[in-house]
Image (tube, rainbow, N blue to C red):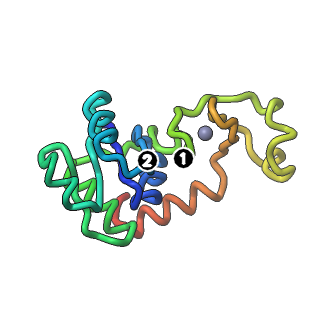
Amino acid sequence: MRFILTKELGRLSRWLRILGFDTVYFKEENYSKLLLLALREERIIITRNKTLAERVAAKAVYLKEENLPEQLKKVIKRLNLKIEENKMFSRCVICNKSLEEIEKEKVKERVPEYVYRTQEDFMECPQCKRVYWPGSHWQNIREALNKAGVK
Ligand SMILES: [Zn+2]
């Protein structure tokens, strides 16, 4: 299942990516362009824009919720999303690209020294070259998901 989110939903976009979902964050207000893209790439529209949601009723999820945990909960429930542990943290939260494994030696100059010393597994975004590792950051995210009642 793939998504396209409108401009009010930047944080939710990042969270859906963290959960491993292919998510386009569409910041423009050109809704014809958005609809075309959604159609072409078979993306479900998630929006806080009621008018837009009503235009495409079946293919959109309208969120009146303002806070992130509530938004996440609603999307997961409405679309009956399965959260799979092995898909989490597989996607760049900034560019939505699938992360690729990278050898430890190659990230030496690109991560903090203590991270290099304490971590073994690293992933890289093929587009922005950001390096990811399963450190405390991921733990915090798991806790936040727990609080949102997601996991
Ligand atoms: Zn990236």
Q: Which residue is mark 2?
A: 25
Callout 2 secondary element: strand
Label 1 Cα neighbours within 10 Å, binned few <14 / some 14-19 / many ≥20: many
* Mark carried by residue 147: none
Q: Position of residue 113 (x, y in %)?
A: 86, 50
17 vs 126, left or right, is left
Look at discs 1 and 2 and give the one toward the viewer.
2
* Mark carried by residue 93: 1
Q: Amino acid at mark 1?
A: Val
Residue nearer the viewer, 60 or 35: 35
42 vs 115, left or right, is left
Q: Are marks 1 and 2 in contact (CB under 8 Å)?
A: no
Callout 1 secondary element: loop
Label 1 CB sits under 8 Å from any ligand 1 atom: yes
Quadrant where the C terminus lies?
A: bottom left
The residue drawn where x is 81% and y is 30% is 106
Quadrant where the N terminus lies?
A: top left
C-alpha gap between disc 1 and disc 2: 10 Å
Quadrant location, ligand no. 1: top right
Residue nearer the viewer, 20 or 6: 6
